[in-house]
Amino acid sequence: MHDMGSMPMGPMQGGSAPAGARSPDYSDGIAPAMMHGMAMDDMDDTAPSAMLLLDRLESFAGQGGHGQSWEAEGWYGNDTNKLWLRSEGEREGGRPHDGDVEAFWSHAIATFWDTQLGVRSDFGQGPKRQWAAFGVQGLAPYWFELEATAYAGQGGRTAARVRAEYELRITQRLILQPELEVNAYGKDDERRMLRAGISSVEGGLRLRYEFTRAFAPYVGVAWEHLTGGTADLASAQGRRVTERRWVAGVRLWF
């Protein structure tokens, strides 16, 4: 190492650049290209966008029969305010058995959390019911997707729905999705085969393969268990209290 003291350091440490050397920033005088929409002054949180997700579009078969069911949601708006639409239900024998459509004004109140104010319309067996709705939805710690909505209808009717979902990535394309839903009503509604209290607990476990984020077929199992007075009413009418089904379908994202 003592011989390094005699080594000329000037050429290694600096000095005059040779002719034809690159510019100090290696740009050779070419101005950097800007990515469209990525400049800070081009970013606009108020710019509207849209999404449509058919989370479930499936056929089912169980001890109580077979049919089709759906679950879909979509929105249009910006990061703060959106028009949010949701629908879920099922059909048996070629006609709707039970379903609802909801429309909300969705307003962001925190990172990953929105409040929702709107209306819900029930259709299928029995008379149609209309509800005013208020709720919250968002992404809880550990990436659980949660929805909690309260409803008020004519004649002093009230209802509530709580839903939770989770996506467990087995691989980058293979995803296991468990979900749970609880429904409750404040008054008896025998024309729609419902009694006051927690009326049903529903769950599902679906395994999907994402060929792309926009197209993912899946298979799984789903179940519904009626509880309380609703279960007693179903038993008296000869209907099943617990229903298990095998399901197969596709998830589409636009």
Image (cartoon, rainbow, N blue to C red):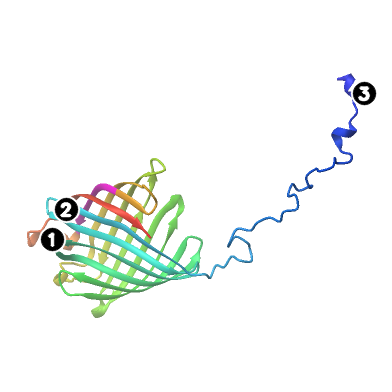
Task: Classify the position of the C terminus by image quarter.
Answer: bottom left
Residue at x 26%, y 64% (from the top left corner)? 184
Which residue carries the number 3 mark?
A: 6
Along the line of sight, the residue nearer the viewer: 28 or 90: 28
Residue at x 33%, y 61% (from the top left corner)? 162
Which residue carries the number 1 mark?
A: 232
Which x, y percent locates residue 125? 15, 69
Which residue carries the number 2 mark?
A: 242
Along the line of sight, the residue nearer the viewer: 241 or 106: 106
Crowd around label 1: few <14 · some 14–19 · many ≥20 (10 Å):
some
Decide whether the magenta segment is chiefly helix, strand or loop: strand
Q: Which residues are magenta?
A: 218-227
Name the residue type under label 2: Thr
How far, Cα to Cα, is label 1 from label 3? 99 Å
Residue at x 38%, y 45% (from the top left corner)? 168
70 left or right of 253 in image: left
Q: Secondary structure at mark 1?
A: helix
Crowd around label 3: few <14 · some 14–19 · many ≥20 (10 Å):
few
Which x, y percent locates residue 210? 36, 47
Q: Earlier in the sequence, mark 1 or mark 3?
A: 3
